[in-house]
Image: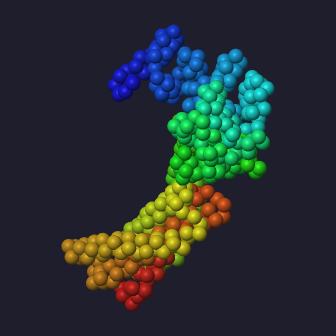
Amino acid sequence: MEGEEREQTFAGTRAFAEAGDWARVRAIMASWELLDQIDFMEEARDLDAVALLRALPEGRMAEVLSRLDPGHQERILQGLGDPEAKAIMAGLSPDERTAVLAMLPAQAARRLLSLLTPEQQVQAKGLLAYPPESVGRLMTPNYVAIRPEWTLAQVLAYVRRHGHDSETISRVYVVDAQGVLLDDLRLRQVILGNPETTVASLMNHQFPSLSPSDDREAAVREMQRQEVYALPVVDDDGRILGIVTADDVLAVAQKEATEDIQKMGGQEALGTPYLETPFGTMVRKRAVWLAVLFVGEMLTASALAQYQEEIARYVVLALFIPLIISSGGNSGSQATTLIIRALSLGELRLRDWWRVVQRELAAGLVLGLVLALIGVLRIVLWHGLFGTYGETFALIAVAVGLSVVGVVAWGTLIGSMLPLLLRRLGLDPATASAPLVATLVDVTGLVIYFTIAHLVLAGTVV
């Protein structure tokens, strides 16, 4: 469904749900595509989520639930009876089941674990034993493993028999008798190859892999670099433990990008969708950083206090304070945003710091000169039209122009180096938010401005 038809259908279905006509809701939702069912479940959060899930066709319940956000999943699972919860949990893939169990409170997770078969319980507990942010939590043990001595005809027959439970069959994994990963083959190679050809003859023993202890972001970067749909996960002895697929990696990439963007806005990452975040939690996560920034801005007042004599003597300088410090803050915010993104995409390494210094310092000087020219022209123009700045307008223009160049270059340098410093200290570079950089540059920018102004205007009266 698209556009107006979709909105009308959703509105009608909502009306039936609000009236308690679940038979009608069930009949309508049964005719929808999967994505429409998911979208309606997400948009109708204020309705009875458990009843809506029950209105779905039985074969779709697990698939739809697995695509909802964690908070929505938790509410639904805690509202389901044991038989329904058992059926849904059985319908989830191992990695989806792990994600659901990990986000639930301990008591609710134990309840759902008890509903699984002994084999599923062992599998789930094994995956949950890995650290929360690790590749081990993302992987699924459902993959197709083949032997090097098999012919391609045998491989195809095996895939037909056992591929239904695999997370993906775009690649098959060649293992020895001990489960050590020897190679991976694209299914295209198997389908188009001579049926009598052996797997061993197609192997080149070159394949990418991950460790279960790797950070999840490593999976994102490696999958982007290799341009593959799935990556094998192996232990220290080279035995394959499972695979990580693109759908899981995309979810991680979205989550990490959301957290980085929220941190770059000058707050803690919410961790849950905006409308699902409790009001108190949202205020707390925003207030902490606002308080830090507020205290930082107090240093600006302290810096101004140190230049009271200069301000009293050259009152006109006060007019340009917002112009100067905002230029430095803006340039620093631009730099820190670019560097944080480059780090998250793997475009930069810590060893590139000197190249970054050279590049950003040069960029800061050029940008500063552009802004300085605009500022000087403004002063000259205003003086010509209104005589605003008196006889020393030329010196004021020089002081402002030099200050803009210095503050913008300094802001750009600080903004580019702070994320790299945080990464070097083992911290999240996204913590170097634009507001934090702007606050730091505000204080130092005032020092640069009044120092230059004092030197240029010494011996004059403005």
Work out whether residue 158 or residue 413 is closer to the camera in this orientation and state it: 158
From this view, report whether residue 265 is shown above or below residue 170: below
Residue drawn 54% across the image and 63% down it? 348
User: In the picture provided, is 76 more to the left or to the right than 450?
Assistant: right
Task: Give coordinates of residue 237: x percent, y percent.
Answer: 77, 50
Residue drawn 55% across the image and 69% down it? 352
Task: Give coordinates of residue 1: x percent, y percent.
Answer: 39, 24
Query: In this rendering, does residue 287 appear at all?
Result: no
Q: Residue furthest left?
A: 385
In the rendered image, the quadrant that contains the C terminus is: bottom left
Residue drawn 70% across the image and 42% down it? 175
Residue drawn 63% across the image and 36% down it? 151
User: In the picture provided, is 365 more to the left or to the right than 80?
Assistant: left
From this view, report whether residue 327 is shown above or below residue 207: below
Residue 189 falls in image quadrant: top right
Task: Give coordinates of residue 4: x percent, y percent.
Answer: 34, 25
Picture mark count:
0
Residue 176 falls in image quadrant: top right
Task: Give coordinates of residue 296: x percent, y percent.
Answer: 56, 63
Rendered image coloring scheme:
rainbow
Work out whether residue 149 or residue 109 is closer to the camera in this orientation and state it: 149
User: In the picture provided, is 373 more to the left or to the right than 452?
Assistant: left
From this view, report whether residue 373 is shown above or below residue 148: below
Q: Residue furthest front?
A: 196
Residue 399 falls in image quadrant: bottom left
Query: In this rendering, does residue 391 appear at all?
Result: yes
